[in-house]
Image (cartoon, rainbow, N blue to C red):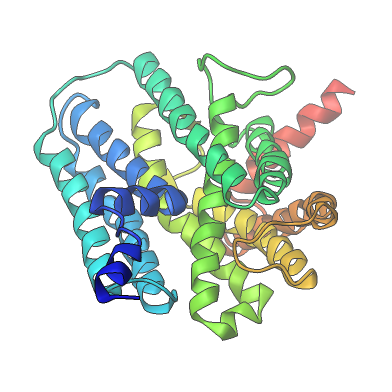
Amino acid sequence: MTPESAAVALPARPSTARLAWEEFAQQYPAWMVLLLAASMLNTTLSNLGGPRWDLAWPTVFPYAMFVAFYALRAGDTPGIHRPRALLLAASAAGALLLLGTAVGRRPTPMDRQSLLHLYEVCNFLAFIPLGIHAWTHGRGTVGVFFGAGLLYGTALENGGIFMGYFAEMAYRLYLPGCVAPLATMLGWVMVIYACAFLTWQARRSFPRLRRSAVWSSVVFAMCGVLFDLQIDPIATASGCWTWDLRLPPFYLGVPIINYVAWFSALMPFGLGLFWVQDRHGIGEGAAWPRKAQVELVLAAPLCLGLATVMFFGSMAVLEGGLSGPTYQIIGDFGRGLMGMR
């Protein structure tokens, strides 16, 4: 074979645009975190009647998770051409997106009803490609997140409203029998999927983490809490949900009970997720066999029970006993149930 014919036989190198698109499509859950952060930043600066810079700075939390994901991916993923360039390109793209959002904002104040509609639309728009990603990148994960994850999120969101800790009214789409809107229930699927995706990358990079379902669940839960450090202050300020007045603000108008609830909810689910995954020898981000998916669905009630114990136990410690707002609200709920009987 002559040098000329050998050169002709070499496959054409994909264009930069195609490589960028493939990277975005394959790693969409990480990019979704960034895109939602930009969307919420725009709401903070454009739609709340005036720029709320006090609510804008928590954008650093989802951006930091995005950069950390790419730092781990570039440093521990075989076959990546010029890993440092990938990290710099992703970090720069994220920074430019957020900076462009802040600089290019256009004041468009919205009333509460319009903000609720915007929240629903943004959640649905982000949810659709997430479903496509789950279907095309390991079909076995569809049942994990859109089965067990959706059931778990539905129980959490409706449970908090039923007990009276917060309210989510005047949305457009509710499922029969649910007091939580469809958008917030699907939001739990998005959060669980993104947290698992980020934690899988951490498990690839740190073998010790891969050997521990407990520590993996801690990372999983912390990813959710860090993401929520941006979400909940904006949602509270825009009226997407309202808190019981007995719950004192702790961080940018959000009561501490919210973050205790997030960690208490996510860690048990993560524990079940990684325990089942490790039990079946499933790789990070690989397809789950049907048996493993069923096991996670069956484990979800146990995870919910553990989450309940963690939540009420933690709040008893933080509030100094059983007479704080958390137990006052659950007491009212219990007395209401007895009255109904």
Above or below for 43 versus 170: below
Residue 45 picture location, percent across and down = 19, 34
Q: Residue drawn at (72%, 34%), measured in percent from left and top?
A: 333
Residue 233 picture location, percent across and down = 36, 42
What is the residue that sits farthest to the right in this orientation? 341
Q: Residue drawn at (61%, 78%), measured in percent from left and top?
A: 210
Q: Is residue 6 left or right of residue 203?
A: left
Residue 257 visible? The answer is: no
Give residue 268's quadrant in the image. bottom right
Above or below for 329 versus 316: above
Residue 132 picture location, percent across and down = 54, 38
Residue placed most toward the observer, 295 or 80: 80
Above or below for 251 versus 199: above
Q: Is residue 134 left or right of residue 256?
A: right
Residue 112 picture location, percent across and down = 36, 18
Above or below for 78 versus 49: below
Give residue 320's quadrant in the image. bottom right
Residue placed most toward the observer, 9 or 249: 9
Residue 57 visible? The answer is: yes
What is the residue that sits farthest to the bottom in this orientation? 208
